[in-house]
Amino acid sequence: DVKVTQSSRYLVKRTGEKVFLECVQDMDHENMFWYRQDPGLGLRLIYFSYDVKMKEKGDIPEGYSVSREKKERFSLILESASTNQTSMYLCASSPRGGSWSYEQYFGPGTRLTVT
Amino acid sequence: DQQVKQNSPSLSVQEGRISILNCDYTNSMFDYFLWYKKYPAEGPTFLISISSIKDKNEDGRFTVFLNKSAKHLSLHIVPSQPGDSAVYFCAANGGAQKLVFGQGTRLTINP
């Protein structure tokens, strides 16, 4: 069974703080993704990675950065948290190649509140 | 620029009846589509998919229909059950193994 875990289910941070969200997958997947989910906007891609040390910007990368030092771990960093980054953050992974690679496996999400 | 649109934010259906969730897309390059289901406080889980070379794919109570000329797909759930109450997201392959998601439709099954 594919398992994607996220370090925190709920997080409250202050404006200006640096925030780290961690994601770990146990299926040896090459691809990893970070999304945020907001009401009425669906899931929007922040960053993704095809391999260790590789990263690509998604649709809304501003204010975020990522790190992938190991294949199973993908971290999302909010350099200076702002209230408009209050959201549900979802991590996902998928294998490389073929139509099956479109099927992404999601973690449970981190509800981040920035005050 | 919303390339995948789910125009109904919510849908309410009686238990045992058919639920039909709709999704429209604008990019004719999309050739693979997926539906995900999301319960509160959980991540989305994959439900069913369809390739553009097909117009229908069935898996138990779930069937997805694709109309390429209309750039429209729909998810049919028959019969609907209380456990089907969730938010459903439509997604399309956005190139480079990425997915583009719709806004989601909240389905409520009433007993």
Image (cartoon, coloured by chain):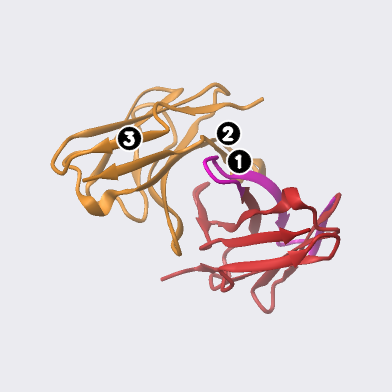
Chain colours: A orange, B red
Give whichever of A69, B20 is nearer the camera: B20
Callout 2 environment at 10 Å: few (<14), some (14 to 19), or many (20+)? many
Other residues around mark 3 within 10 Å, as few (<14) / some (14–19) / many (≥20):
some
Percent position of residue B70, x then y: 67, 79
Left or right, A78 with reference to A70: left
Q: Is residue A30 left or right of residue B78?
A: left
- In terms of image quadrants, where is residue B111? bottom right
Residue A110 is marked as: none
Q: Which residue is mark 1?
A: A101
Q: Chain of mark 3?
A: A
Q: Is residue B3 visible?
A: yes
Compare residues A21 and B40 and report the one nearer the observer: B40
Q: Residue at horizontal 45%, vertical 69%? A: B2
Q: Which residue, given by chain and number where applicable, does mark 3 sit on?
A: A11
Marks 3 and 2, how far apart at CA: 29 Å
Q: Cβ–Cβ below 8 Å for labels 2 and 1?
A: yes
Residue A68 to residue B39: above or below: above
Question: Label 1 sits on what residue type?
Answer: Ser
Numbered disc 1: what chain? A
**Which residue corresponds to the image point at 13% horizontal and 41% vertical from the top-left?**
A16
x and y, in percent, of residue B68 in the image:
69, 72
Residue A95's disc number? 2
Do circles 2 and 1 both sit on a common chain? yes
Stretch in magenta? B38-59
The disc, 3 or 2, on the residue closer to the chain's N-terminal end is: 3
At label 2, which amino acid type do we have? Pro
Q: Is residue B63 left or right of residue B30?
A: right
